[in-house]
């Protein structure tokens, strides 16, 4: 059979509010998530020996062993569905690893989608949703890769949102940032609520109608993990300063727990010009103009 293929787009936290830490130690979040036009690519060749081959510009930073989230997705779904048909995966890794844009989670969600296609499972099959929740907090929202509000520890998803297109520039300074230390730096005790001063972006299926009005709404919010992430990785502050200084930048913010940051612009020409300028100034950084939606 011919390989089945799908994209694994980068996930961007346009806002991220920490509401507190639960008694079980997990943090309660409220985040507006959008997806980028850049991402990894995953294919599945049915009937071949199980495993994953990794290539692409960031392949060196990713294991092809059992800890790879693509293989974890296959194992977890197999536990949910007896007799699951599978094969060999090939992952083209174009997104930086441990970078706050959900690369591993997007890859796992892509694996679930391919396995669903191979096994004639509808996208809403309960086993897919159950498997996604077991793999990681960001995997459920990456299953459909559509803009929405993500709450709790990622298990509560709002309806898909019709966001206006946002012209963005994604930048990663080449530093992997682990999520757990960022939350530890936040310093919340189990059962403690958090008042980070970040306004929630509330949405029930509607959103500001134009990019300009959406950017204004986003500017009133923020990312509660940005300050603790900068404390452990000061280069994030350098990235934000560099983005803010680019001509036409309307908003600069970190995504997830870092270190990838994004800037928003009025149009694609402005984001592309900013990307050229920043890539020339910082040739060692990963710089990608894209569209978020």
Image: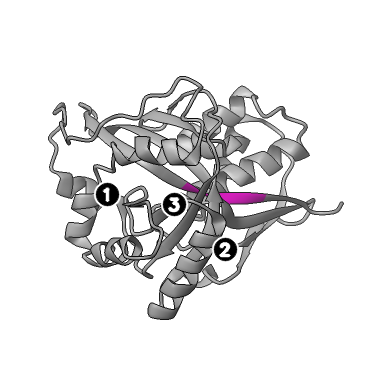
For mark 1, what is the residue? 180
Residue 248 falls in image quadrant: bottom left
Question: Which of the 4 quarters of the picture holds residue 201?
Answer: top left
Q: Residue at x 64, y 24 (%)?
A: 124
Q: Which residue is rendered at x = 56% and y = 64% of the image? A: 94
Q: In this figure, which residue is indicated by the disc labeled 2?
A: 93
Distance between mark 1 and mark 2 Cα atoms: 23 Å
The image's colour scheme reads one colour
Measured as percent of width and height from the top left, residue 17 is found at 28, 35
Distance Cα–Cα, label 1 vs label 3: 15 Å
- How packed mark 3 is, by other alpha carbons closer than 10 Å (few <14, some 14-19, many 20 or more), is many
Secondary structure under the numbered disc 3 in the rendered image? loop
- In the rendered structure, the answer to whether residue 56 lies left or right of residue 240 reads right
* Residue 19 magenta: no
Tell me the residue that label 3 is attached to: 101
Q: In the displayed structure, does residue 276 sit left or right of residue 282?
A: right
Residue 215 lies, with reference to residue 175, above or below; the image says above
Front disc: 3 or 2: 3
* Residue 246: x %, y % from top left: 37, 65
Q: Depth check: 240 or 33 in front?
A: 240
Q: Residue at x 14, y 37 (%)?
A: 188
Magenta stretch, residue numbers? 7-11
In percent of the image, x 77 and y 40: which residue is there?
118
Helix, strand or loop for disc 2: loop
Position of residue 101 in the picture relative to residue 56 (left or right): left
Residue 54 visible to an observer of this rendering: yes
């Amino acid at each position: 059979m011919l390989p089945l293929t799908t994209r694994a787009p980068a996930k961007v936290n346009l806002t991220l509010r920490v509401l507190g830490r639960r008694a079980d130690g997990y943090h309660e979040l409220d985040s507006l998530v959008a997806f980028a036009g850049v991402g990894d690519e995953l294919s599945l060749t049915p009937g071949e020996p199980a495993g994953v081959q990794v290539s692409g510009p960031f392949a060196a930073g990713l294991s092809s062993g059992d800890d790879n989230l693509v293989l974890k997705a296959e194992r977890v779904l197999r536990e949910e569905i007896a007799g699951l048909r599978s094969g060999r995966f090939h992952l083209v890794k174009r997104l930086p690893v441990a970078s706050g844009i959900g690369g591993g989670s997007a890859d796992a969600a892509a694996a679930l989608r391919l396995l669903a296609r191979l096994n004639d499972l509808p996208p809403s099959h309960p086993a897919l949703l159950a498997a996604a929740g077991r793999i990681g907090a960001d995997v459920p929202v990456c299953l459909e890769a559509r803009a929405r509000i993500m709450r709790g520890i990622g298990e509560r998803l709002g309806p898909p949102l019709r966001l206006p297109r946002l012209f963005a520039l994604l930048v990663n300074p080449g530093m992997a940032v682990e999520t757990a230390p960022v939350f530890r730096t936040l310093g919340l005790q189990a059962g403690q609520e958090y008042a980070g001063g970040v306004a929630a972006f509330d949405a029930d299926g509607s959103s500001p109608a134009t990019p300009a009005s959406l950017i204004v709404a986003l500017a009133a919010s923020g990312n509660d993990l940005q300050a603790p992430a900068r404390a452990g990785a000061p280069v994030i502050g350098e990235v934000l300063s560099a983005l803010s200084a680019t001509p036409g930048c309307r908003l600069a913010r970190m995504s997830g727990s870092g270190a990838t940051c994004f800037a928003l612009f009025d149009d694609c020409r402005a984001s592309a010009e900013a990307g050229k300028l920043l890539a020339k100034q910082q040739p060692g950084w990963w710089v990608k103009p894209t569209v978020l939606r």
